[in-house]
Amino acid sequence: MTAMSEKIRRDDVQFTIDGEAVTASPYETIWQAAVRMGKSIPHLCHKDSTGYRPDGNCRSCMIEIEGSGLEVSCRWKPQPGMKVLTDSPKARKAREMVMELLVTDQPPRNEARDPDSQLWYWAEKIGVTHSRYPRRELPQTDRSHPGIAVNLDACIHCKLCIVGCSEIQGHDVIGMHGRGIHAKIGFDFDDPMGESTCVACGECVQACPTGALMPAAVLNEQQALTNLPDTRVDSVCPYCGVGCQITYNVKDNKILSVDGQDGPANQNRLCVKGRFGFDYVSHPQRLTKPLIRREDTPPKDAGLEIDPANPLTHFREASWEEALKVAADGFKRIREEESKALAAFGSAKCSNEEAYLTQKLVRTGFQNNNIDHCTRLCHASSVAALLEGIGSGAVTRL
């Protein structure tokens, strides 16, 4: 046995949960140890996901420790000989009271922003879905953002959105505003979300356990959840080459929203394009058939205006065979007249295999070396930073 393994064994903590002996790491919380044993303890402000730390401010995970009293299980670390009770009358009563306070300001479940949210799941499991306390006046709906709907009447101040925005994504847009009963979540200097410096990464949407922050596309004008997916499709983001793993939420063969998966490249995180940049799939202006320029179209000119919603004023629909033949004949004609007049630009969306085929087409088909990559334009700033930082701005594609 190595010295390191002896140290790990020596640091292990022996204690009991509901009378059952448990061995836990000194870095493990009581909540983690209990869940590992199969116990079910509510949690709202603690997101069991990479990068999120437990805060203990919702108090829904209360347990009883003999000789100490009630404590939050997501924050407390076990101590040798500790006796933890997760389902004692005292712990159950505390969780019921906490849940009653949390649902006080919520809309009725049948009118909730997300009736299947984590909050309502635990409220139903605890058996407290109504409150005897009066509901306070809450901020109005904020629909200023094109991708995210903000309904603070569902907010419980768990602060997961703040952690996600500031600590996970590093944008520091979301924070607490006001004091006491007037405290609320806000953006920048309490600006509407759409006017703030939010970059629309959507981390707050994925973290929110109540429906206070949701994809705008799944809510109707009354802010009720109406667009529920009938299919979920696991995929990889089609944009840059990072390889973020995602899940498409699909209804009637139309993408409603996107969730980040815990993949090795993204660990649940997404950027604005990965989270919200999918509307092009069903956009009415998306081209679904090949188009060939009409012979009666005016000559090409910088001032020529074409309505993208009606391109048939200048183009006609064609089959793939005809379109490919026209393109190939055009390439051959230009190559025979002046081969250096042809060039190709690679895309960051292409795989390495596609990039290889692109450069091979140029060098063998166009018979020149006129090939470049979008990095020279859209990533010019990152190339400059790489050159300054590590001495090379090369990319891994072309």
Image (cartoon, rainbow, N blue to C red):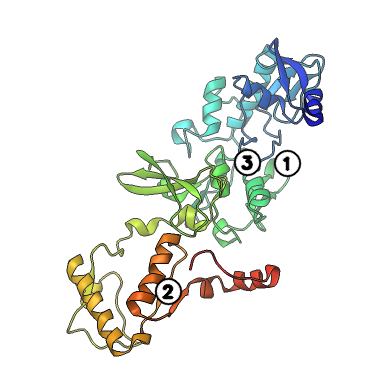
Residue 349: x, y in percent?
44, 62
| Residue 130 visible, this orientation | no
Q: Position of residue 232 (x, y in %)?
A: 39, 40
Q: Going 56% across and 46% down the picture, which residue do you hit?
A: 264
Please, what is the three-letter code of the amino acid marked with disc 3? Thr
Closer mark to the observer between disc 3 and disc 2: 2
Q: Is residue 98 left or right of residue 153?
A: right
Q: Secondary structure at mark 1?
A: helix
> On screen, 355 above or below 16?
below
**Element at label 3:** loop
Are the residues tagged 2 and 1 within 8 Å (C-beta)? Answer: no
Q: What's the residue type where badge 2 is placed? A: Phe
Residue 54: % across, % down: 69, 36
- Left or right of 320 on screen, residue 212: right
Tag nearer the camera, 3 or 1: 3
Q: Label 3 belongs to which residue?
A: 50
- Reading the image, the residue beneath label 1 is 180
Q: Is residue 361 placed above or below 4 in the rendered structure?
A: below
Contact? badges 3 and 1 (CB < 8 Å):
no
Residue 100 horizontal/vertical position (percent): 61, 26
- For residue 87, above or below residue 302: above
- Reply above or below: 188 against 340: above
Residue assigned mark 2: 345
Say if residue 34 shows up in the picture.
Answer: yes
